[in-house]
Amino acid sequence: MKLAFSTLGVPGLPVADVLGLATTYGYHGVELRAHREEPVHVGLGLAERADVADAFKAAGVAVTGVAGYARVAAPGEDAAVVEEVRGLVELARDLGAPFVRVFPGGEEPDADEVAARRLGVIAEHAADAGVRVLMETHDSHRTGADAARVLGAVGHLHAGALWDLLHTWLGGEDVADTVAALGPYLGYVQVKDVAGVDDTTPLGLGDGVLPLAECVDVLSRQGWDGWLCWEYEKRWYEDAVPLPDLLGRGREFLARLLSEAGQSPR
């Protein structure tokens, strides 16, 4: 499996500094949070996008995904949601990223139907761009079973799932059940650690209660060989330890889990 981290852990940090952290601590990928307050977002022009792509290529670091905030199951008109995701898909294409992250965000009884309909439209555009749109296990669809209901209805290779381990755990779903549900759809996995259900302040990997070893073990036994991306939610927890102080130990922890599961980080 390949190791990455998300820029959610280093909010606002310039691209050059992000790449410096990745190369210093041995991460081969970075998930870019695509928000207006970040250096990389859909408002960048083509020349700026090319500069970012060139910087990543020169550093030998992959853009593992573009993490957007569109909510594909949210109430409202389809057109606005589809257009928002199209913009993220085009950004990912220009950066050479294989994935775009979206949220479900459903509130109505027909949320599954709404999300599937929109993802079906979006997937066609994503296929043309060579990008997969991944609905994260989050909020209204926090388990693998929730996501699989939607993605099964879409039935398109360019609509998949991003597994956020925290949310499936909070949803009471066993790791093996998540992997079984998301198997055909899984794009990549966000790992993290927290103290407990009532305290989700981000911790260093291995310092909390999430089933990280089981996650890596089950994925390995299934022969899965994608990205493990550490999403450290520093942006939402100002008092959390700065991510750069934890990156080295975090990589060592993941490498040990991979070794115990018969794999090597790459």
Image (tube, rainbow, N blue to C red):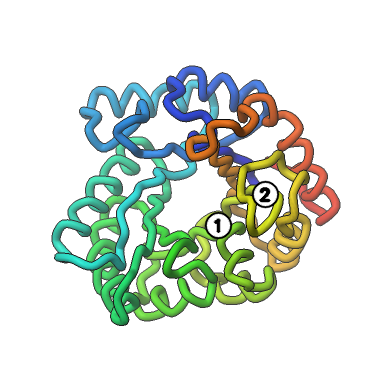
Give the residue number, with chain letter if any, for mark 1.
164
Badge 2: how crowded within 10 Å, few (<14), some, or many (20+)?
many
User: Which labelled disc corresponds to residue 194?
Assistant: 2
Nearer mark to the viewer, of 1 and 2: 2
Image coordinates for residue 65, horizontal then vertical, percent: 44, 44
Q: Nearer the viewer, residue 17 or 235?
A: 235
State which tag comes first along the sequence, 1 or 2.
1
Counting from the top left corner in percent of width and height, residue 90 is at: 26, 44
Q: Nearer the viewer, residue 196 or 44?
A: 196
Q: Does residue 71 sit above or below 173 in this rendering?
A: above
Q: Residue at x 82, y 54 (%)?
A: 262
| Three-letter code for the amino acid on which mark 2 is drawn | Val
Residue 113, x across and y down, in percent: 29, 79
Horizontal arrangement in the rendering, residue 207 relative to residue 46 (left or right): right
* Helix, strand or loop under label 1: strand
Disc tally is 2
Amino acid type of the residue tagged 1 in the rendering: Asp
Name which quarter of the figure residue 244 lies in.
top right
Q: Are marks 1 and 2 in contact (CB under 8 Å)?
A: no
Badge 2 marks a residue whose secondary structure is loop
Instruction: From this view, report whether residue 248 is shown above or below residue 193.
Output: above
Using residue 225 as the reference point, say whether residue 33 is left or right of it.
left
Query: Which quarter of the figure is the C terminus placed in?
Result: top right
Q: Check disc 1: other Cα within 10 Å, few if <14, some if 14-19, many if 20+.
A: many
Give the residue displayed 38% in from the left and 29% down from the top: 53
Left-right relation of 223 to 162: right
x then y, percent, for residue 223: 69, 63
Q: Quadrant of residue 171?
A: bottom right
- Marks 1/2: CA distance? 13 Å
Q: Residue at x 68, y 26 (%)?
A: 25
Using the rendered view, name the quadrant where residue 3 is placed. top right
Of the pair 262 and 109, the residue shown nearer to us = 109
